[in-house]
Image (tube, rainbow, N blue to C red):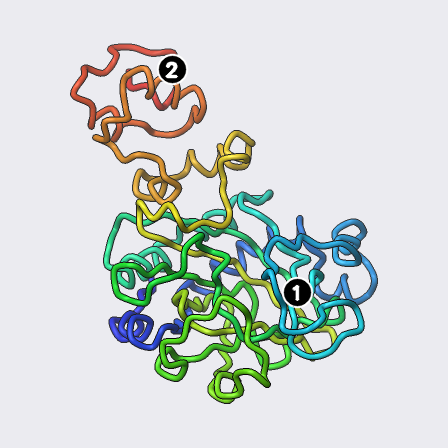
């Protein structure tokens, strides 16, 4: 397993953001990306006008829940300059995804989780954002204003250690100049500013002057703190595209932070299959109580076995004070 270095961890903690090259091996990304094409057209398909309904999804309408309550400029079609435009957010797909399951497994990749634990200083973490984001040249003007992600929390963020959460993008494609690498500003260059509203170039020229692009190979992981100013930029390369997996982590108990939730989709087959391949530590990232937690009872574990028949519940049974059943209906989750 590739591992982030202590330098990467300190850079995220001290500077606010870091790009970790090759955190996930390219061969793992390439295998997982085959599942992408069940959701999105391959770039050559898209730019050739092919892809059917998968392409049509980019041609009108948008989920605008990501938009700030005020934009620095008019984001309507035909406007220019940094702005939040609804069509920038076309191409977001929520976990879990169809296919082989390899793409879903990237959500709990040990290299990414290990970095998040070390950066946040805890093994009691929750995944609170799990979404793919596909962009194609020509779909939208992706140029955004400089902003901090206040829409991840119902209270303002705090900049002290112990209160951070970690926002991240796992690169599923090579992200180069021309294909929209995110621009970010070191916290030292932003002077500790916290701004609810996005900042235009005229209002905050120093932020734009200090921005740095974060291009990287597929398998790289871009992580940033909630107090980091950043922005998306337009895709300028004809035929270009960009595919990211948004993975964000918070400390257990930080109920004021949230974004994507899996509960509405937790009974669908693809989520069931994902759960059945997970360890207790991986499931804890989704809020499943660990073995030994007082939530668990023999009846609760029987019900868990009914819901996820192929999940090995042995660690949870071993964590019970009660005797496990001597026999059961045969599910892997019910020790015999």
- In the orientation shown, which residue stands out farthest toward the right? 49
Position of residue 158 relative to residue 32, above or below, is: below
Give the residue drawn at x 55%, y 62%.
244
Quadrant holding the C terminus: top left
Q: Image quadrant of residue 192? A: bottom left
* Mark 1 crowd level (few <14, some 14–19, many ≥20, 10 Å Cα): many
Query: SS for tag 2?
Result: loop
Which of 99/198 is in front?
198
Position of residue 302 relative to residue 137, above or below, is: above
Q: Position of residue 168 (x, y in %)?
A: 44, 62
Q: Which residue is mark 1?
A: 135
Q: Which residue is mark 2?
A: 330
* 268 left or right of 56 in image: left
Query: SS for tag 1?
Result: strand
Give the residue drawn at x 25%, y 51%.
123
Instruction: Tell which circle, 1 or 2, labels the residue nearer the N-terminal end.
Output: 1
Q: Position of residue 78 (x, y in %)?
A: 80, 73
Number of the label disc, if any, that sits on residue 225: none
């Amino acid at each position: 397993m590739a591992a982030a270095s202590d330098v990467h961890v300190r850079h995220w903690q001290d500077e606010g953001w870091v790009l970790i090259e090759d955190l996930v091996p390219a061969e793992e990304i390439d295998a997982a990306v085959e599942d992408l094409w069940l959701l999105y057209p391959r770039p050559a398909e898209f730019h050739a006008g092919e892809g059917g309904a998968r392409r049509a999804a980019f041609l009108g309408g948008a989920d605008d829940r990501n938009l700030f309550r005020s934009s620095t400029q008019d984001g309507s079609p035909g406007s220019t300059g940094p702005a939040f435009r609804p069509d920038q957010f076309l191409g977001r797909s929520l976990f879990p995804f169809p296919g082989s399951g390899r793409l879903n497994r990237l959500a709990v990749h040990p290299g990414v989780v290990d970095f998040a634990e070390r950066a946040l200083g805890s093994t009691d973490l929750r995944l609170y954002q799990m979404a793919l984001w596909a962009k194609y040249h020509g779909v939208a003007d992706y140029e955004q204003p400089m902003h901090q992600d206040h829409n991840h929390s119902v209270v303002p963020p705090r900049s002290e250690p112990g209160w951070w959460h970690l926002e991240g993008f796992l690169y599923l494609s090579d992200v180069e100049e021309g294909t929209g690498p995110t621009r970010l500003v070191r916290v030292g260059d932003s002077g500790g500013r916290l701004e609810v509203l996005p900042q235009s170039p005229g209002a905050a020229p120093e932020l734009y002057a200090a921005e740095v692009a974060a291009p990287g190979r597929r398998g790289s992981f871009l992580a940033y703190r909630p107090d980091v100013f950043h922005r998306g930029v337009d895709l300028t390369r004809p035929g270009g595209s960009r595919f990211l997996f948004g993975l964000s982590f918070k400390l257990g108990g930080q109920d004021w932070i949230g974004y994507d939730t899996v509960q509405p989709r937790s009974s669908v087959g693809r989520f069931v299959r994902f759960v059945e391949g997970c360890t207790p530590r991986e499931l804890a990232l989704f809020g499943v109580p660990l073995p030994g937690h007082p939530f668990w009872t023999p009846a609760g574990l029987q019900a868990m076995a009914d819901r996820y028949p192929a999940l090995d519940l042995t660690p949870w049974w071993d964590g019970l004070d009660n005797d496990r059943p001597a026999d059961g209906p045969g599910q892997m989750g019910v020790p015999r």
